[in-house]
Amino acid sequence: MKVAVISEFYPRASDPVLGVWAHRQALATRDAGAEVRVLVLHRPVPPLRAMRQGPRTAMQSARELLRQPPRARLDGLDVEYVRFLAPPRPRSYGSWGAYAAPPLALALRRLRRSFPFDLVHAHNAVPAGEAVRRARIRAPLVVSVHGGDVFHTAPGSAEGAAAVRATLSSARLVLANSAGIEQMSQVLGAARSRVVRLGADMPGTLAAPEREPTVVSVAHLIARKRHADVMRALWLLRDRLPRLRYVIVGEGPERPALQRLAGDLGLGERVRFTGQLRHEDALDVMHRGHVFALPSTDEAFGVVYVEAMAGGLPAIGALGEPGPEEISQAGDGMVLVPPGDPEQLAAAIEELFSDARRRAALGELARETVERAFSWEACGRATVAAYEDALR
């Protein structure tokens, strides 16, 4: 079968980490037997954050975005970057599918001449799925919901809610990355749906751990990831675990505030910001830690949890979030704490560092959970089975 994958979030020259999970799923699908081509919705407009930092930053950001080649070959997959223009994200994101539809329609019709695809798989209802729907391409539409549609776009505006509902209700099949997201998608109009879990690679050998006890987070630096809660937990443990360190991998608008907080709490020497790293380097840094902690909210799945667990790290997530809850139900290795509660987070961290043998045993169980329930091979097979179902 031939599949055209459409995604806004996908690796590109200026950000090789963006949407790496969508790329890995495309590779897993190809390895499971489907032929795959990828079209990436690429908006070469600097984000408002860059514009607010002044003309120089905005121009640098614009140049990086405009340098994106129209075509690339990533790990053997042909990828085309489809440019579109749209107003700033905060006020208009729900309508971006309408802006992306005309250039995407041209790109899909052009692709079909050389690659007669059987179906289209859009990552997220907005903007990718909505753009496909508006492009009126005569092919079954499969839409993956990764969280943004149900947590942010639909609740964010009437326009966003209408776009999400119209797209999910028109999809031949909706794929959710967890059972909780599937239920939310059904409320928003998904008639046929199923859960397809994303995955992680299993390292052949475990990385040598840091000399000092180390907690690691890998995530975009935004408020809902709650890095600040981990810092406050470190402060609460400052006397009982004085050697404890915290490594933060990632970049984002919250970095200045987090750096100030580290200073205010007297943790400057114990907190290290690496900035954004290549995916392989981020995994290496993460796997050298002892415990992974990301008590984030609005967490639909969280590939990074299973990536940490694959490297032998117990992972801490937030209680009640769809992704961490489902990962914890699949097996051992995931520890859940109430969201927004540094005291409970500190207690969970202290318990994990109180017994090195127990922590190592839990890390080994975490690896077994990932190998059994969250491999990319299983994701590829499940995705191809979903495509076959959509084509019936």
Image (cartoon, grey):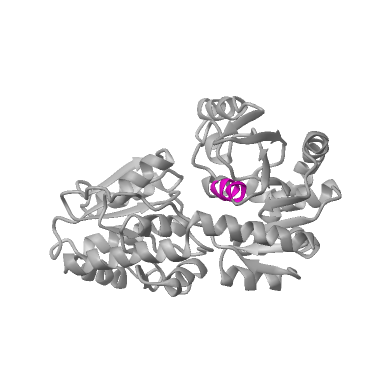
Q: Is residue 24 above or below residue 319?
A: above
> In this view of the protein, which residue sits in the foreground, 36 or 81?
36
Residue 196 left/right relative to 352: right
Q: Please check the rendered image and state whether residue 28 is part of the magenta-colored stretch, yes or no.
A: yes
* Number of callouts: 0
Q: Which quadrant is home to the C terminus? A: bottom right
Q: Please check the rendered image and state whether residue 103 is part of the magenta-colored stretch, yes or no.
A: no
Residue found 52% across the figure and 55% down from its top: 377
Q: Which secondary structure type mostly characterizes the magenta part of the structure? A: helix
> In this view of the protein, which residue sits in the foreground, 194 or 344?
194
Which contiguous range is marked in magenta?
24-31
Residue found 73% across the figure and 53% down from its top: 129
Residue found 34% across the figure and 68% down from its top: 333
Q: Residue furthest front?
A: 33
Q: Is residue 161 visible?
A: no
> In this view of the protein, which residue sits in the foreground, 210 or 219?
210
Q: Is residue 269 visible?
A: yes
Q: Position of residue 335 (x, y in %)?
A: 35, 70
Residue 20 left/right relative to 96: left
Q: Position of residue 295 (x, y in %)?
A: 39, 64
